Image (cartoon, rainbow, N blue to C red):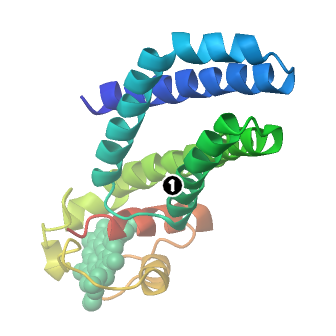
Amino acid sequence: METAIRHTHLLSVILFLLIYLVKTALLLANKEDGLAKFTKAVKIPEMIISTLFLVTGVYMLTQIPEIKSLMIIKIIVVLASIPLAVIGFKKKNKALASISLLMIVAAYGLAEMSKKPSSVKATVGAEIYSVSCARCHGDDGKLGLLGAPDLSASAMDLATRIEIIKNGKGAMTPFAGVLTEEQIKAVAEYSEGLKK
Ligand code: HEC
């Protein structure tokens, strides 16, 4: 379900961009007739595509626990580009139409670029956690072996987590030397995500 929606979103974004690309190209090439014909031909598909694009986008947003600043920038840029595009095409203003197209492309480029490393990091964090931490803390953070605190309820900040994971505390063994700095950071971030 989740991936189906993600793929629908991506597909609708691509189709949406293709339509805008063709429109902008026609406008820039002064092909007014072509532009009018094309606009008319894609009117209904465009309505379906932009509805899909918005609905899937909103759905995906509701599935994300914390909205990151980059995502807010993306949303603002996409939302701002829409009126610019509408005005640009209505007034046949080449600069406005091109700027709005560039804005949408940039917003998605930005989001795609930032996505990969963080999801790789999250997987690394989850793997380390299940190997090194779950035996005391449990997969959900609640096991509490040897008096281990419930990580799903811990409000400890990231820096303190990293320190405790490095140096250990009480019955918790230190992980400095066992895990690299990067692995410690990844698993500390993963442990924060157990909070619900
Ligand atoms: C041998 C059992 C054990 C293992 C393995 C272990 N912990 Fe712990 N952990 C504990 C115990 C016990 C404490 C409580 C320490 C204290 O305050 O005295 C603790 C405390 C913590 C805290 C502090 C939470 C709070 O709110 O006080 C964090 C965060 C934490 N562990 C994360 C991890 C992570 C991440 C790993 C894996 C890299 C890990 N632990 C592996 C037993 C363990």
Q: Which residue is at a point 12% across and 66% down the rendered structure image?
A: 143
Label 1: which secondary element: helix
- Residue 160 placement: quadrant: bottom left
Q: Is residue 179 visible?
A: no
Q: Amino acid at mark 1?
A: Ile
Q: Residue 26: percent from the left, percent from the top?
A: 77, 19
Is residue 160 visible from the viewing direction of this image? yes
Q: Position of residue 9 (x, y in %)?
A: 42, 31
Q: State the residue at coordinates (63%, 21%).
A: 18
Quadrant location of the N terminus in the rendered image: top left
Which residue position is annotated with label 1?
Answer: 75
**Is 42 or 56 nearer to us in this picture?**
42
Task: Name the quarter where the C terminus is drawn.
Answer: bottom left
Answer above or below: position of 43 versus 183.
above
Q: For the point 76% across and 18% down, which residue is it?
A: 32
Q: Nearer the viewer, residue 65 or 129?
A: 65
Q: Residue at x 41, y 63 (%)?
A: 67
Disc 1: residue Cβ within 8 A of ligand 1's nearest atom = no
Tell me if 19 is positioned left or right of 53 in this view. Answer: right
Among the 4 quarters of the image, the one containing residue 77 = bottom right
30 left or right, relative to 183: right
Residue located farthest toward the right when viewing the structure as drawn: 29
Q: Is residue 22 above or below residue 106?
A: above
Residue 42 coordinates in the image, percent (x, y): 52, 14
Q: Residues within 10 Å of mark 1 (few under 14, many from 20)?
A: some
Where in the image, quadrant-wise, is ligand 1 located?
bottom left
Task: Look at the picture and state if 147 lies above or below 119.
Answer: below
Nearest to the observer: residue 35 or residue 185: 35
Residue 81, image x and y in percent? 61, 48
